[in-house]
Image (cartoon, rainbow, N blue to C red):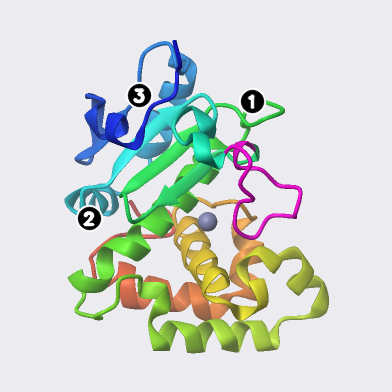
Amino acid sequence: MSTYLSIDQCRNITAQAYVGGLPICYRDGNVSPQFVQTVLDALSLLPEQLLQIIAERQFILILSGILSDVHPEQKYQKPRGHSQHGKGDDINGLCCASLRHIHLTEFTTRHKAMDTAETLRHELGHALDYSVGAYLGLGYRDVSLNYDFNQVHLADVTLMGSHAKQVLTYYIQNCSLAGRSEAFAEATASLFGGGCQDAEYFWRHFPNVVAWVESNILNVLGIPTRGDF
Ligand SMILES: [Zn+2]
């Protein structure tokens, strides 16, 4: 029997836990109890207001073995911003905003995922990006599409040295929409303990982006940051 879960089945998985109102969905046997505990521990360290806002937008967090367990079509698809040889099963997190799914996987193609908490914080940043535009009256689906955010992103990229540009290329992606979306997600993660990059390195090279997300989004929403929660 196939272990694949269709998109509809994802929605039909009964939530096994809720943290800050966010449903945590998985099937016993698909993931180890240790992996579930790692996720629950990471969620418990985040401000509840952050999870509540995402939950109100009806996101669910889905845990699986590898990504193609739940998204078979991703198996051979190149993830955004990855090298041309990248495959869906090489990544251990994904935020699918249109479906309001956040995915975290225990394994990638080659090994056990080592950075579950960091990936979780980054993917929650994407979910927040999608959740708060209408909430704040910005009139956009994603806050990272907002004109002011684009200006601060451009300001940081303009000042960035060539080495930092190489290290942070994922958050630039030729200043495309994808780059700005990744920078928003990572800036959010960096304010809650760090995402896929070292938080201090990210702050140093994206000072305007981080300050903008903190003062225009998180402070406005009353979400404590930088460990004040
Ligand atoms: Zn991302």
Eyeballing the image, is 71 above or below 203? Answer: above
Eyeballing the image, is 163 above or below 127? Answer: below
Secondary structure character of the magenta stretch overall: loop
Eyeballing the image, is 176 above or below 93? Answer: below
Q: Amino acid at mark 3?
A: Tyr
Question: Element type at marker 1?
Answer: loop
Q: Which mark is residue 26?
A: 3
Residue position marked by numbered label 2 in the rendering: 53
Mark 1 or 3, which is nearer the eye?
A: 3
What residue sits 23% from the left and 53% below the top?
49
Instruction: Depth check: give the residue in front, 71 or 107.
Output: 71
For label 1, count other residues whose C-alpha is less than 10 Å away and answer few (under 14), some (14-19) or many (20+): some
Distance between the Cα atoms at labels 1 and 2?
30 Å
Q: Amino acid at mark 1?
A: Lys
Quarter of the view holding residue 20: top left
Q: Amino acid at mark 2?
A: Ile
Instruction: Depth check: give the residue in front, 220 or 4.
Output: 4
Q: Are marks 1 and 3 in contact (CB under 8 Å)?
A: no
Q: Which residues are the magenta region?
A: 75-89
Residue position marked by numbered label 1 in the rendering: 112
Measuring from the top left, give residue 43's x and y in whole percent.
37, 38
Measuring from the top left, give residue 25's x and y in whole percent.
31, 28
